Amino acid sequence: MTRKILPWLLMASSISAFPLQAKTMTEYDLLVGSYTAGASEGIYRFGFDATTGKLDATPRQVIKSENPSWLTLSKDQRRLYAVNENGPGQTDVVGRVSSFSIDPKTHVVSFINQVESKGEEPTHSSLSNDGRFLFIANYAVKPDPGGVFAVMPVGKDGTLSEVVQTSTHPASNVNPERQASSHVHSAVSSPDGKYVIASDLGADKLFVYAYDGKKTQPLQPATIPSVDLPAGSGPRHLLFSKDGKHAWLTTEMNAQVAVFDYRDGTFKRTQLVDLAKGEGQQQRAAGGLHTSPDGKFLYVANRGAVNELLVFSINQSTGQLKEIQRRSVEGKEPREFSFDPSGHFVLIANQKSNQIVTVRVDPKTGLLGETVQTLDFDSPSDLHFLTSK
């Protein structure tokens, strides 16, 4: 489709900070990652008003970076890490990861350094709980060389060092087009930080690694090294409950959510929830998932042809899900979404319709309400609010 070049994009410089506005308790900064094949130039910092649910029309800062599709914040929000999802057919064919500092008072973002991710199309990253390592999921669309799970040291000042450890996984080959090799889609730490779990779409498995941050190569296969998933399911993103007793996993290719009991590196599946309700394959493309700020509801993106958010109530004892709502995202390909700090709004990055859509949320019922803003933005992919002062 023809991409619309927004006027404020033409003013962007390599690191251009727009005049800062006065902040109140209801005003926050939002970081937006994006794909840069069109008009977008990288990472954007917008002002957000939690009383109205609206983003400023003009960004406060534009940080040039190629395909920063996934953003990872440090716990203190003073460091930002972005995967540069480069690969064959793009201007830069080498997957990379970039590091930035964030000023705690002004939230101005400044570049630190960039290193290779040792794989193609890095699509996800996360920090170890102790902040010593960044875990990189190199998805790699093409089966040769296939996906690579990489481990990258992080300095105390946020500087990234060269990858020190990589892993690949055997493919399931259930789907000959999409599962002929490993395709690592995400990697997250367990709540206690003792394990790292890699979701591999090409393998139909979760791979569990024991973590020891004191070692140069901190990962080794856990006692139970993998978790089998339905054939051809294509695991994508894993999310733990706040108490660490349960976990939810989206499986992209069959559009399901798997529910697990979790304990000390072991997963026991207790439920499989269909997002597509038996509809055709074009309806199936499970994506991001997040709980409400209070942990009572789970929200899941189903892309495909339906492009909707599903809302589930969570049984606090078992972690199991009950569907309570389906709502259109009013766009195409909801790549990611994020709740604002007040918990009254959810912002949706509709990648292929080039918009950020803000929808009102009722925190008590979990239900999604009216759309309060649709902001034109080229290929948004990830959203993170800055709440530190």
Image: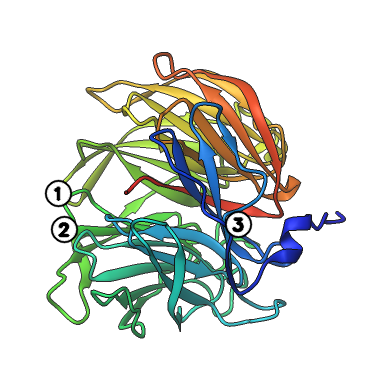
User: Disc 3, disc 2: CB below 8 Å?
Assistant: no
Viewer-nearest residue: 370 or 22: 22
**Colour treatment of the image:** rainbow
Q: Position of residue 244 (x, y in %)?
A: 21, 40
Dot 1, how many residues are within 10 Å of its Cα: few (below 14), some (14-19), or many (20+)? few
Q: What residue type is labelled 3?
A: Asn
Classify residue 258 by image quadrant.
Answer: top left
Q: Do the residues labelled 2 and 1 touch (CB within 8 Å)?
A: yes
Task: Look at the image and tell me whether residue 38 can be seen.
Answer: no
Compared across the picture, whether 107 is left or right of 56 comes to left
User: Which badge, 3 or 2, comes first in the chain's sequence?
Assistant: 3
Can you tell which mark lies on residue 194? 2
Q: Residue furthest right?
A: 2
In the picture, the disc for residue 175 is 3
Q: Position of residue 52 (x, y in %)?
A: 56, 27
Question: Where 364 sits versus 190, above or below?
Answer: above
The residue at 56%/49% (across/down) is 46
Residue 71: where, in percent of width, then height? 46, 59
The reply to whether residue 285 is in sight is yes
**Dot 2: what SS?**
loop
Foreground: disc 2 or disc 1: 2
Residue type of the residue flagged with mark 1: Asp
Q: In the rendered structure, which amino acid carries the disc numbered 2?
A: Lys
Q: Where residue 358 sits in the image (x, y, percent)?
A: 60, 33
The furthest residue to the left: 214
Question: Mark 1 and 3 residues: CB-CB less than 8 Å, in contact?
Answer: no
| Residue located at (22% from left, 22% from top) | 317
Q: In which quarter of the image is the N terminus?
A: bottom right
